[in-house]
Image: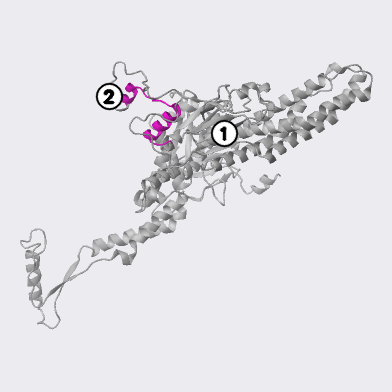
């Protein structure tokens, strides 16, 4: 038996969840706690509703740096309308709410010929799950669900199970509410105590005090005084209610007030809110603003909600949909789902308008487009884009503002030159140098043997697939590491939060390594082919072929290493900003060598917006997707990013 088989041999044909999901707090189930406890309800509904607002979009990865949104594929149609009686928002809210309360959520994936996608998604409440079935503890073969005494078994090909982490069982999740069990129990008991006080004695705030040394009241005298007081001073129908009462026999009215400070109810309530917010990883000021909250801090907290608090849950749902739902519904293997967080973090309409105008250098809305935003009818001739006479083409430093003058910069623009470090350049050159040495040791003996047979043109001595694969495999890990290093350095230099994902660059870095390997080996083959014909002098002939590799291990390794490291650095800087969502940066092409190509010298200093190409069609120096080998080989140009 294998390791996993021996480890999981205790699982035979059935394994059960330990009872119904959720916790019990003072006879309150998890569902009842959600319904009755305001702090828990506020936190869960706030997070679930905000997460459900983020759209899940389907994209086609046309190329590593090109993607297009898909609207009519099975997954796109299914996520837009999951079933006949539920919207996309409602489904996502149910999934996220279950994850936040129970740490897991179940969705049935059922074929349905009546829907445009041919499928439907149906959320199943976590409390309907009775047990799991299977002999494998890492994923159930079936789930038993039921309610009102009726049960059904659903096999794994008909459901998606989202679940969090458990330190004891990979099939279960530690319910987030369980971490709040004590604080919720305290809140429940505190609410019960306060309710009892109001019901049993909390309404009075005064009583009448009679001196002990006056004549003792008889029962008849006490009843007479009480009746007179009730009829005259107490109740909504008493004629003297609200007036100053007339007392007798030295009586006094004593005040009684409840002191909430002594009971520390306010402090306990605040602590409970902070504990709930802590378990769900968000700033409590988002829901319960404090006295020190400012507009700027509220704005930053709102963005942090999506970048920090909700991002892990959104990613968990998205990755499971990509891994299991898309193949199940027959989605194209190039398609993938991604949540579009930009709708919540891209700023207000005024902020977006100012940024777009600054990038364009001129107005970007026609009069009719502006009137449409105010629900006003279109005007004749209002579809022309009017540019004032004082705004010149390309005048990026003085775009007009529609409502107000451009705000003054609070600090100078930040810039970063995407140039490899000396250590990175040498590291890449060493990879080429070691490769050329291995190539020399393999090829030179074969060349000598072929020439002796007079068969030097047969190319039997050259294995292109081998050399391309070997060089690409050597370049890829170094290029990926340098890309990550340079991307993080870019974010630090521009003072941008580091949310960089190396995994998103793996495919493109691999394609860069493959292409660079083909170009380098093609150059080596061409130079070997150009060596003079066999002249009968074996030593002299081998020396001339050796000269090709002498040059390769020397100058070619240095220039190739520098050029590839520079190309990786340029891509890394742009990718870092693209992943961070920066929209208002510019990039500048800069020539750094003393003898540049004429085509590169012609665009030295050219500046364009971050998401546009330079006039030669390239995104950055060394962009092999837009430039051919003659424009990329040995290129030392760099790109400078400015925010």
Q: Secondary structure at mark 1?
A: strand
Closer to us: 536 or 346 = 536
* Residue 360 is inside the magenta segment: yes
Closer to us: 564 or 180 = 564
Residue drawn at the location 11% of the way across and 61% of the way down: 235
* Residue at image mark 2: 376
Marks 1 and 2, the one that precedes in the sequence: 2
Closer to us: 25 or 267 = 267
* Residue 374 is inside the magenta segment: no
Instruction: Name the side, left or right, on which 307 lies relative to 456.
Output: left
Label disc, if present, on residue 171 of the rendered structure: none
Residue 87 visible in the displayed image: no
- Locate residue 451, reporting x and y percent: 90, 19
Q: Secondary structure at mark 2?
A: loop
- Locate residue 199, reporting x and y percent: 24, 61
* Residue at image mark 1: 640
């Amino acid at each position: 038996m294998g390791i996993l088989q021996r480890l999981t041999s205790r699982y035979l044909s059935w394994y059960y969840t330990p009872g119904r999901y959720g916790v019990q707090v003072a006879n309150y189930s998890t569902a009842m706690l959600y319904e009755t406890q305001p702090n828990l309800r506020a936190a869960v509904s706030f997070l679930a509703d905000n997460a459900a607002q983020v759209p899940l979009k389907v994209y086609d990865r046309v190329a590593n740096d090109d993607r297009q949104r898909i609207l009519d594929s099975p997954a796109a149609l299914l996520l837009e309308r999951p079933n006949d009686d539920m919207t996309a928002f409602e489904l996502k809210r149910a999934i996220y709410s279950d994850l936040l309360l129970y740490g897991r959520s179940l969705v049935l994936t059922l074929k349905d010929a009546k829907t445009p996608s041919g499928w439907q998604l149906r959320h199943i409440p976590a409390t309907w799950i009775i047990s799991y079935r299977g002999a494998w503890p890492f994923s159930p073969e079936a789930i038993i669900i039921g309610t009102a005494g009726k049960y059904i078994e659903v096999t794994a090909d008909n459901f998606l199970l989202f679940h969090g982490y458990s330190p004891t069982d990979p099939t279960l999740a530690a319910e987030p509410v369980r971490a709040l069990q004590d604080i919720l129990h305290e809140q429940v008991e505190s609410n019960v105590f306060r309710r009892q006080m109001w019901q049993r004695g909390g309404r009075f705030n005064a009583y009448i005090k009679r001196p002990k040394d006056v004549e003792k009241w008889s029962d008849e005298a006490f009843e007479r005084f009480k009746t007179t007081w009730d009829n005259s001073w107490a109740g909504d129908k008493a004629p003297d209610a609200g007036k100053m009462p007339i007392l007798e026999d030295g009586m006094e009215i004593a005040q009684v007030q409840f002191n909430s400070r002594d009971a520390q109810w306010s402090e306990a309530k605040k602590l409970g809110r902070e504990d709930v917010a802590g378990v769900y990883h968000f700033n409590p000021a988002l829901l319960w603003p404090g006295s020190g909250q400012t507009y700027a801090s509220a704005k930053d907290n709102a963005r942090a909600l999506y970048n920090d608090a909700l991002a892990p849950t959104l990613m968990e749902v998205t990755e499971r949909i990509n891994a299991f739902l898309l193949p199940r519904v027959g989605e194209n293997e190039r398609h993938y789902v991604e949540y579009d967080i930009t709708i919540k973090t891209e700023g207000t309409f005024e902020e977006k308008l100012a940024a777009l105008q600054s990038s364009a250098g001129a107005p970007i809305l026609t009069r009719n487009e502006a009137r449409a935003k105010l629900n006003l009818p279109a005007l004749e001739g209002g579809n022309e884009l009017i540019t004032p006479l004082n705004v010149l083409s390309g005048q990026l430093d003085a775009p007009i503002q529609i409502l107000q003058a451009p705000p003054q910069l609070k600090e100078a623009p930040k810039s970063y030159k995407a140039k490899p470090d000396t250590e990175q350049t040498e590291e890449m050159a060493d990879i080429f140098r070691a490769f050329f040495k291995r190539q020399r040791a393999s090829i030179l003996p074969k060349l000598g043997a072929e020439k002796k047979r007079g068969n030097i043109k047969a190319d039997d001595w050259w294995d292109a697939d081998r050399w391309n694969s070997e060089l690409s495999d050597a370049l890829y890990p170094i290029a990926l590491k340098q890309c990550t290093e340079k991307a993080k350095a870019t974010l630090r230099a521009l003072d941008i939060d580091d949310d960089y994902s190396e995994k998103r660059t793996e495919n493109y870095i691999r394609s860069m390594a493959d292409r660079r390997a083909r170009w380098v080996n093609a150059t080596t083959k061409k130079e070997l082919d150009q060596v003079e014909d066999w002249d009968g002098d074996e030593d002299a002939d081998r020396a001339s072929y050796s000269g090709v590799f002498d040059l390769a291990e020397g100058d070619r390794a240095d220039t190739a290493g520098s050029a590839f490291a520079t190309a990786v650095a340029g891509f890394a800087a742009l990718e870092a900003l693209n992943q961070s969502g920066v929209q208002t940066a510019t990039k500048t092409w800069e020539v750094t060598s003393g003898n540049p190509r004429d085509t590169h010298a012609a665009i030295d200093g050219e500046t364009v917006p971050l998401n546009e190409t330079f006039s030669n069609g390239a995104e950055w120096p060394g962009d092999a997707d837009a430039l051919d080998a003659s424009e990329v080989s040995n290129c030392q140009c760099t790109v400078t990013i400015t925010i």
